[in-house]
């Protein structure tokens, strides 16, 4: 299958793309390698995908209508996985217009460019759309609510996808991800940020009383759900991809301490605005229609994350790693709107 993945150099995207090339799909990746976090980390992710198989890559902005249309016209994707977005609740409160531009306009540009060729469109949504007005666990039929600009953009993205599904009979899978973690996790996300602080002997921000809870979901389980969505044929549907076992902030830090074999220094702080008290996925629909079945317990996933992170922490000055990043950045493809085979 010819599959276009936006945001493929990122955390979830790189794991997905690695799986897709290993499975023999024709893959095209668009990513702007922006400075939300160090672009060298994304370059390393691209190198990891390239080690698994050949794919096409263009450095580009999904809001660039001409570029996106050219990619879709030339590659003619049969399926699209739209992961590219500005992510994070707290940052969206500081930069709401940037989030609206990338997450809403970018989704509209992509839908319009690929509606002729792509029979399947998979949209990465978020558990943040549920807000605070529902009971637990969260069901896909529950009401949605914007507690942050980020959540508002994801709701808008879902609505755009549903409109295109009705107008153009596109098959849509809207996947609401629940707190994804694992190797290659973004530096701004809590688990990786806390791990860095613990290893550096720095205080860890501890918001509220530690009773807030998140439905942490291991990245490979999320990838299983995305791959299943690519094969599903259910018109336009919303699915929760979570682990269905919420973990409190206090417990998360305890498990991370055990995995790293270090104690955390806690810096007690007030609760954060825009944060939901709990996220908890009802995954019965995903189990029934996608065959989705998360296999990784939080304790096992954290051991895998910690093993990767300690190795990453130890090898940050490794010559081989720096050489790999340099080779990718000097290839020319990261500045050229024409694709580079990696």
Image (cartoon, rainbow, N blue to C red):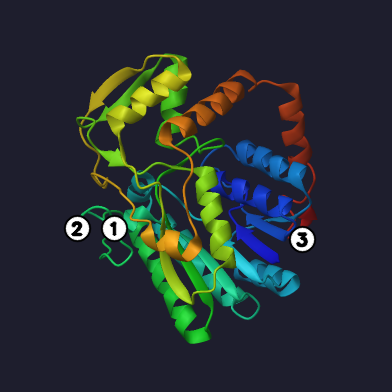
At label 3, counting other C-alpha atoms closer than 10 Å, the crowd grade (few under 14, some 14-19, many 20 or more) is some
At label 1, counting other C-alpha atoms closer than 10 Å, the crowd grade (few under 14, some 14-19, many 20 or more) is many
At label 2, counting other C-alpha atoms closer than 10 Å, the crowd grade (few under 14, some 14-19, many 20 or more) is few
Q: Is residue 105 visible?
A: no
Tell how many labels.
Answer: 3
Specify whether 276 is left or right of 226: left
Q: In this view, does 276 lie above or below 198?
A: below
**Could you say where residue 8 lies in the image, as x and y percent from the top left?**
62, 52
Q: Residue at x 60, y 70 (%)?
A: 65
Q: Is residue 320 above or below residue 124?
A: above
Question: Where does label 1 land, which residue?
Answer: 130
Q: Nearer the viewer, residue 226 or 203?
A: 226
Q: In this view, does 49 lie above or below 317?
A: below
C-alpha separation, residue under disc 1 versus residue under disc 3: 39 Å
Q: Which of 98 and 261 is in front in this view?
A: 261
| Circles 1 and 2 in contact, beta carbons < 8 Å | yes
| Circles 2 and 3 in contact, beta carbons < 8 Å | no
| Circles 1 and 3 in contact, beta carbons < 8 Å | no
**Of discs 1 and 3, which sits in the foreground?**
1
Sequence-first tag of 1 and 3? 1
Which label sits on residue 133? 2
Query: What is the secondary structure assignment of the residue under circle 1?
Result: helix
Question: Where does label 3 land, which residue?
Answer: 338
**Could you say where residue 234 lies in the image, as x and y percent from the top left?**
49, 74
C-alpha separation, residue under disc 1 versus residue under disc 2: 7 Å
Specify whether 294 is left or right of 267: right
């Amino acid at each position: 299958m010819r599959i276009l993945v936006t945001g493929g150099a990122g955390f979830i995207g790189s794991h997905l793309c690695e799986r897709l090339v290993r499975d023999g799909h024709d893959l095209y990746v668009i990513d702007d390698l922006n400075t939300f976090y160090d672009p060298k980390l994304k370059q390393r992710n691209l190198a990891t995908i390239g080690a698994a198989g050949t794919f096409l890559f263009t450095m580009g902005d999904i809001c660039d209508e001409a570029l996106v249309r050219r990619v879709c016209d030339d590659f003619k994707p049969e399926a699209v996985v739209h992961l590219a977005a500005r992510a994070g609740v707290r940052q969206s409160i500081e930069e709401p217009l940037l989030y609206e531009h990338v997450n809403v306009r970018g989704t509209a540009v992509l839908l319009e460019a690929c509606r002729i060729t792509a029979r399947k469109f998979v949209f990465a949504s978020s558990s943040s759309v549920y807000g605070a007005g529902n009971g637990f666990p969260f069901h896909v039929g529950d009401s949605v609510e914007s507690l942050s600009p980020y959540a508002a953009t994801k709701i808008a993205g879902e609505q755009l996808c549903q409109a295109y599904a009705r107008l153009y009979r596109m098959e849509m899978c809207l996947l609401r991800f629940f707190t994804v973690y694992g190797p290659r996790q973004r530096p701004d996300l809590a688990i990786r940020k806390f791990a860095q602080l613990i290893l550096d002997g720095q205080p860890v921000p501890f918001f509220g009383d530690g009773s807030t809870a998140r439905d942490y979901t291991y990245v490979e389980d999320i990838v299983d759900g995305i791959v299943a969505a690519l094969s599903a044929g259910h018109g336009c549907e919303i699915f929760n991809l979570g682990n269905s076992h919420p973990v409190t902030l206090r417990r998360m830090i305890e498990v991370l301490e055990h995995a790293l074999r270090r104690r955390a220094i806690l810096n007690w702080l007030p609760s954060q605005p825009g944060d939901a008290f709990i996220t908890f996925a009802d995954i019965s629909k995903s189990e029934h229609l996608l065959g989705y079945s998360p296999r990784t317990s939080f304790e096992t996933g954290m051991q895998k994350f910690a093993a990767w992170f300690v190795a990453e922490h130890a090898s940050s000055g490794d010559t081989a790693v720096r050489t790999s990043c340099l080779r990718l950045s000097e290839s020319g493809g990261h500045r050229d709107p024409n694709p580079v085979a990696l």
